[in-house]
Amino acid sequence: MDSSSNWSLSIFSSLLAILILTVPCFSEKAPYSTFAKDATSAPEVVFFDYIVIGGGTSGCALAATLSQRSNVLLLERGGLPYGNPNITNITGFANNLADTSPSSPAQLFISTDGVFNHRGRVLGGGSAVNAGFFSRASKGYVKKMGWDQKLVNEAYEWVEKKVAFQPQIKQWQSAVRNGLVEVGVKPYNGFTYEHLFGTKVGGTIFDPQGHRHTAADLLEYADPTKITVYLYATVQQILFKKEAGGRKPRAYGVRFQDSKGNSHMAYLKEGSKNEVILSAGALGSPQMLMLSGIGPAKQLKAHGIYILVDQPMVGMGMSDNPMNAVFVPSPHPVEVSLIQVVGITGFKSYIEAASGPLELDWMRRIAHDFKNIANQTMDPLKIPSELHFPKGIPGINPHLLHTPMQAGLILEKVAGPYSTGFLELKSKDPNENPKVTFNYFKDPRDLQRCVQGMKAIAEVIESTFFSKFRYPFTSAQSLMDTMLTFPLNLRPRHLSASVSLEQFCIDTVMTIWHYHGGCQVGKVVDRNYRVFGVDGLRVIDGSTFIYSPGTNPQATVMMLGRYMGQKILKERLAGGRK
């Protein structure tokens, strides 16, 4: 073949790739009646080009993209987010987290640090149960990850067309925004998805009517003839076969179980480019690797798991961005709002806020459930014999604490963080949460950022712009003291927490649900997210992050699913590994 023919073929291949990756195919609107099915309807054996484990924040974007070129199976252990008012309506956020039933879409777990946390158990994953803030990673983060900035921007835009909106900023959020600028968190950058120092209004996945849009909505991009989604499908194990000639073991399928306990086998079709892709999240992905024989040999042996690859870094590097907050009762009505405004400070603490009518009795119910669960499952914890509640807040009628109250929450999240922990198996049952330790504030740099963040919150509360929403004679210090009486976690309280911001941060730490790690790039997976030591397996989700991106990771996790989906399709078209 002469050079002109090669040139023509190259141009043709490039044009074909552009058409495949950009021209929309026939799509189906949610709730996807033709391709989203209960796993009880699945055949005993199925074959696909790609098997994606986890229909969460990354998995939906990834599966939708891959279906443009290949046959894709998406396995989700939960159900659909549509039709559940606690998911779809902004007013249902707290109710979702308070639901500790076995079928809750927000599955409770408690870290060994004594901090309550949740993981998504629903199509859409964490995007179906979170506070909805949508903000991109910084350009510095993108560069550090080795991603292509142009392709990243295109992937963000692809996501944003379906799920991101500009929020309507009302009185409470405006007061926080103006207060942040007043106390020096500058400049004011207006509305933007970009990660910029100063104060800004970010995006939200709640539309102007207050309806949530989740990563599950990204399946509207999928080719309905090339994708199958099985709901209530719990993957038990990834299957591997030993290759001839001493080559690495290769993933060739998975075994999953439906809600009735029936087992099903999903296999990859013949072809070197077909793959199993783990997108089960920062808890689910390292857990599934271990259950499939990839992890620390000593731990696998203790559970009687065949050791396929001794990989001590699986489950390591677990981090959760610590959150500390101040509850602020308001003498005036406040709107129902989740996170809309953020102050991105120079000392790397992010300040955010939420508001709405609040009845403190819900804390009693949650604490009761948490305590029961903790007593049953968390042996290392010393469960307090009593979980106390505030008897009063200076300047506020104590009866208000037992009736719906107009109030808001101002919080700070430590960026990064530097502190890391680890994840361990409890059993061979994939339905059982693994044991997780985050080691909040183990690194003193995180604690110092929290202290600076709490000082900034105190300044905002006492700022001129915020004065309308603060009861007279109520100081920021008195509100912080009140936080020490709430059942925020299962950690002990210290008297010094009322005079030491360091101790306050340690005693009142909560999660902002941005945990990550366990399958980190460079340690468990390579830059193309292929798992070290095996072939035919990738991990593409937040478990691969070293640090949490931006002020909220969900935009970047969705972007990553789209970004890597496109890269994989290009590799497939090129006919080899890149």
Image (tube, grey):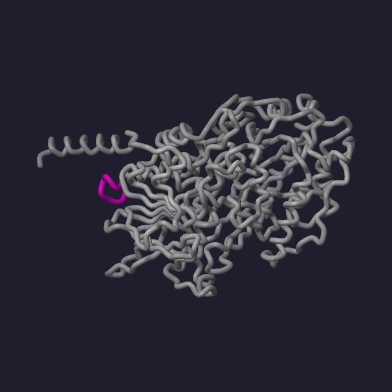
Q: Nearer the viewer, residue 430 or 339?
A: 430
Q: Nearer the viewer, residue 6 or 329?
A: 329
**Residue 243 visible in the shown view:** yes
Left or right: residue 7 compared with residue 408: left
Quadrant placement of the N terminus: top left
Q: Which residues are magenta?
A: 570-578
Against 204, is 418 above or below? below
Residue 235: percent from the left, percent from the top? 46, 60
Name the outermost residue toward the left.
1
Q: Nearer the viewer, residue 255 or 304?
A: 255
How many numbered markers are drawn? 0
Left or right: residue 329 compared with residue 223: right
Left or right: residue 406 compared with residue 549: right
Residue 97: percent from the left, percent from the top? 65, 48
Residue 101: percent from the left, percent from the top? 64, 55
Against 471, is 452 above or below? below
Q: Nearer the viewer, residue 59 or 83?
A: 83
Residue 34, quarter of picture: top left
**Residue 314 visible in the shown view:** no
Residue at 33% across, 44% down: 225
Is 572 one of the magenta-colored residues? Answer: yes
Left or right: residue 524 compared with residue 549: left
Against 115, is 561 above or below? above
Residue at 60% across, 52% down: 104
Residue at 36% across, 45% down: 66
Residue at 55% across, 62% down: 431
Residue 306: percent from the left, percent from the top? 45, 73
Is 264 one of the magenta-colored residues? Answer: no
